[in-house]
Image (cartoon, rainbow, N blue to C red):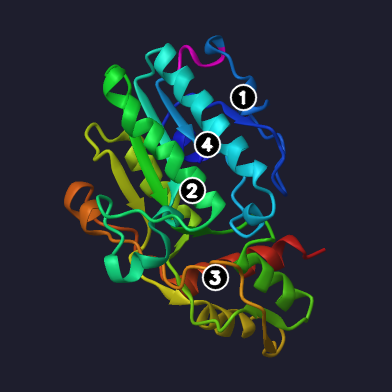
Amino acid sequence: MMTAFAEMGDDVVGIDDLSAQGSHLGENVRKCRVEDLQPDDVKDTEILLHLAASKRVDTSFTDLTSVGRNVQADAHIFELAYQIRLPTLVFASSCEVYGPHAEERGSAEDGILTPDSPYAVGKWASERILHTTRELFPATDVRIARLFNVYGEDEATTAVIPEFLGRVENRKPLVVHGSGQQSRDFNYIDDAVDMILRVCKSPIVPPVLNIGSGVATRICDVADIISTFGEGASAISYGPSRPNEVITFRSDTQLWRSSMGSLPSRSLEDGLRQCWMRRVNDNEP
């Protein structure tokens, strides 16, 4: 994300507490907890993109305090933005706020939200904070980006795609949780970055926008594709379902198309193969 801004000629500073797997201090990245940021740290900022979160849906059921930490960090960022009269605040929310009825009700941005995990409830709560305060602070243009399943190189191995890729690399069976019929809207990282950049930079943007491809793919089909990578097809086994797992997430792209234009068109298979080739090249001597 920082690279994309820099390529447009922007001065970019990243803030990261380095708690996520694989995170590291890159160029122009400052190690700091979000909660410790002060107004002087962001006073000259034009666009603040808030992506930080503990984003494990499954572990949020057993680590309820992670929800409080997320909302507290979000509220701190919102308060800073309002205090300094920040021109543009972009908050990364999640498709999880749509909940288990997303397939039959749809996932239009103005639709009904029924979050069904502690993590999703936290994202919903942070969105509500913004909705109930934005009119009190008109100097700040508040934009909410609801991210669907973003995947790509350097993703934490706890996510399904890097977990599958790692198992193929280590010649182990791929383990699908549940029936594998649950489907997700997978959005390659470069495409998601492009969409988020447009949300940040466009002069006029709807207050909430989905960041997704509009195509849902079953987990068993993802496993089938990835199992063909490497030397010979990998076996696929099935394990227990995860608690309160939503069956289908598919981004409604109607508002995006009408307000922002076309969507990126990379296929899931192309994105998966790109991730695999990056993994192979990184491990070559």
Residue 6 appears at what percent x and percent y? 48, 33
The residue to which callout 3 is attached is 272
| Type of the residue with mark 4 | Met
- Residue at 78 percent across and 65 percent down: it is 284
Q: Nearer the viewer, mark 2 or mark 1?
A: 2
* Residue that protrudes farthest toward the top in the picture: 40
- Residue at 57 percent across and 30 percent down: it is 73
| Earlier residue among tags 1 and 3 | 1
- Residue at 61 percent across and 70 percent down: it is 242
| Earlier residue among tags 3 and 2 | 2
Asked where in the image residue 130 lies, by quadrant, the reply is top left
Q: Residues within 10 Å of mark 3 (few under 14, many from 20)?
A: many
Magenta residues: mostly which secondary structure?
Answer: loop
Residue 128 appears at what percent x and percent y? 38, 37
Q: Residues within 10 Å of mark 2 (few under 14, many from 20)?
A: some
Element on which disc 1 rests: helix
**Highlighted range, magenta:** 41-45
Asked whether residue 142 appears in the rendered view, the answer is no
Asked whether 214 or 128 is in front, the reply is: 128
Specify the label residue 121 is tagged with. Answer: 2
Cβ atoms under marks 2 and 4 closer than 8 Å: no
| Earlier residue among tags 2 and 1 | 1
Element on which disc 3 rests: helix
Asked where in the image residue 34 lies, by quadrant, the reply is top right
Q: Nearer the viewer, mark 3 or mark 2?
A: 2
Element on which disc 4 rests: helix
The residue to which callout 1 is attached is 35
Asked whether 249 or 197 is in front, the reply is: 249
